[in-house]
Structures are given as C-alpha cells and as structure tokens.
Image (spheres, rainbow, N blue to C red):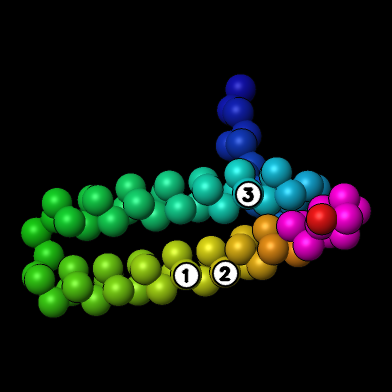
Amino acid sequence: MQRKAARITRNRTRPKSLKSLLKQRLRWVRGNLKALGDLIRSKVSIKEKALITFLFFMLIIFIAEPTIAITEILRKQIETLTGT
C-alpha cells in the first residue's frame, strides 16, 4: 500500500494577534540570519557577498518598519487609556 505524500500548505491569513505577528517576524529574521551566516561561510566572491548582505539588511528594514509602527500605535493607545 502506497502512502500519499504529506501536503504542505502555507497559512496565507494574517496572524490572529500582535504576539503571533511578532513571533512570525522573529522567525523570519532568524531564518534570514541563518542564511546570511551560511553565505558568509560560503565560497562566493566578495562582491556577491556584499550585494546579498546589502539586500538582506534592506529586507530587515522592510520587516522592522511595520513592527515599529504597530508598537508606536499601541503605545499611543495605552497612553490614551491611562491618561499619561
């Protein structure tokens, strides 16, 4: 009897909470850091390493920006609620 291969699907919906969103973004960053470390140890030319490293940091900026914006929105809401 043959087994069917497990079907891998990606969850295309938004995270349900802010905590889930932050965990997701941290997983992305952790994976990217691992890939960057592998690149640094690889036998790729210095020019290619520099270009890929630059693109990596641009990705980090694009990921961090919405996270910072969410944090700032929450901070303002907390200030409004607490009256500080």
Q: Report whether residue 70 is seen.
A: no
How far apart are the alpha carbons under marks 3 and 1? Answer: 15 Å
Left/right of residue 33 with respect to residue 77 in the rendered view = left
Is residue 32 among what the camera can see? Answer: yes
Q: Which residue is mark 1?
A: 61
Quadrant in which the C terminus is drawn: bottom right
Q: CA distance from mark 2 to mark 3?
A: 12 Å
Q: Are marks 2 and 1 in contact (CB under 8 Å)?
A: yes
Crowding near pointer 3: few (<14 within 10 Å), some, many (20+)?
Answer: some
The mark found on residue 40 in the picture is none
Q: Left or right of 18: which side holds 8?
A: left
Indicate which disc, 2 or 3, sits on the residue closer to the N terminus: 3
Q: Read off the residue under disc 3.
A: 22
- Tell me the magenta residue range: 74-83
Q: Main secondary structure of the magenta part?
A: helix
Which residue corresponds to mark 2? 65
Name which residue type carries label 3: Leu
Q: Nearer the viewer, residue 75 or 45?
A: 75
Residue 75 among magenta residues: yes
